[in-house]
Amino acid sequence: MDSEFTMNDLIRVFDDANEGYQYVGVLIQMEGFPMPELIINENANFDKKLEYYKKTYDENCNHKFAKGIKIIDACCGDYLESLEIMFEY
């Protein structure tokens, strides 16, 4: 990753996903864990999940209420395998 992932980046991913994609994958980095966590959001939940992320994470995607938790990347796709490829898992 060349630059810091921001809330505006996350919003863009969800906007793109709303154009017809099935999934949004969100990578969460947690202090003390060697690998990030991949959270899969399905199309039916896009609006509610974005609302949740906006309330819970700041402009730099740091968790507002739990230090050491941060969204580091997100992407959308139609297949779970495509998310794995995009995140190079």
Image (cartoon, helix red, strand yellow):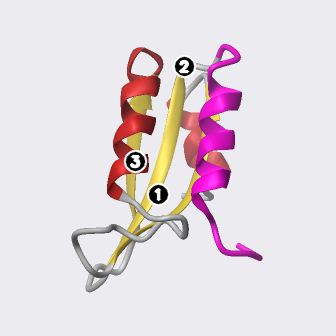
Question: Farthest right residue?
Answer: 2
Q: Which mark is residue 17?
A: none
Asked whether 59 falls inside the magenta stretch, the response is no
Quick check: marks 3 and 1 in contact, CB under 8 Å?
no
Q: Which mark is residue 27?
A: 1
Residue indicated by mark 3: 53
Q: How many marks?
A: 3
Above or below for 82 versus 68: above
Q: Amino acid at mark 3?
A: Tyr
Question: Farthest bottom residue?
Answer: 32
Q: For the residue labelled by badge 3, is the local secondary structure a helix, a strand or a loop? A: helix
Q: Name the residue located 66 percent from the left edge and 74 percent from the top edge.
A: 4
Q: Earlier in the sequence, mark 3 or mark 1?
A: 1
Q: Position of residue 32 (x, y in %)?
A: 26, 86
Q: Earlier in the sequence, mark 2 or mark 3?
A: 2
> What segment is highlighted magenta in the picture?
1-20
Q: Is residue 23 visible to the viewer in this orientation of the structure?
A: yes
Residue indicated by mark 2: 22
Quick check: marks 2 and 3 in contact, CB under 8 Å?
no
